[in-house]
Image (cartoon, rainbow, N blue to C red):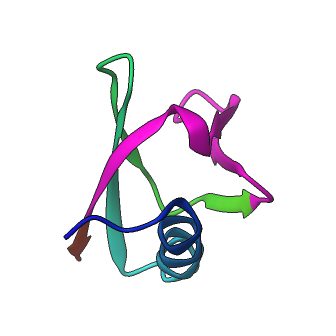
Amino acid sequence: MKVTDNEFKKQLEQYIQFRGIDIILHLKDGTVIELDKNRKMDGDIIVRNTREGKRENIHLDEVLKADFYAA
């Protein structure tokens, strides 16, 4: 089932808040990113801190799909 951009954003915002859910993002450039528990949404930007302590921003326009797993 395909969801609209607004529905995807709303669903992603909900799941980002739940620390017990693992999220894998598939970006349009082919990159796959696993979001750790230290993540948040800021408007249309997903903010994550990498294991190296760097802050990384991912715009929703870059995301092709997301996989959600109960941890």
Which sits in the foreground, 37 or 27?
27
Residue shown at 58% from the left, 37% from the top: 61
Give coordinates of residue 65: x percent, y percent: 32, 48
Which sits in the foreground, 39 or 2?
2
Give coordinates of residue 27: x percent, y percent: 39, 31
Tell me if residue 22 comes above or below residue 25 in the rendering: below
Residue shown at 59% from the left, 59% from the top: 38
Point out the image quarter for the N terminus: bottom left
Tell me if residue 22 comes above or below residue 33 in the rendering: below
Q: Is residue 24 magenta?
A: no
Residue shown at 37% from the left, 68% from the top: 3
Q: Point out the residue furthest to the top here.
A: 29
Magenta residues, start to end = 42-67
Q: Examine the image and state in which quarter residue 20 appears.
A: bottom left
Which sits in the foreground, 57 or 4?
4
Give coordinates of residue 35: x percent, y percent: 44, 50
**Count of marks, rendered view:** 0
- Dominant SS of magenta comes to strand
Q: Is residue 59 magenta?
A: yes
Point out the image quarter for the C terminus: bottom left
Give coordinates of residue 41: x percent, y percent: 70, 61
- 12 displayed left or right of 67: right
Residue shown at 57% from the left, 27% from the top: 52
- 22 displayed left or right of 47: left
Tell me if residue 14 comes above or below residue 31 in the rendering: below
Tell me if residue 1 comes above or below residue 42 in the rendering: below
- 52 displayed left or right of 15: right
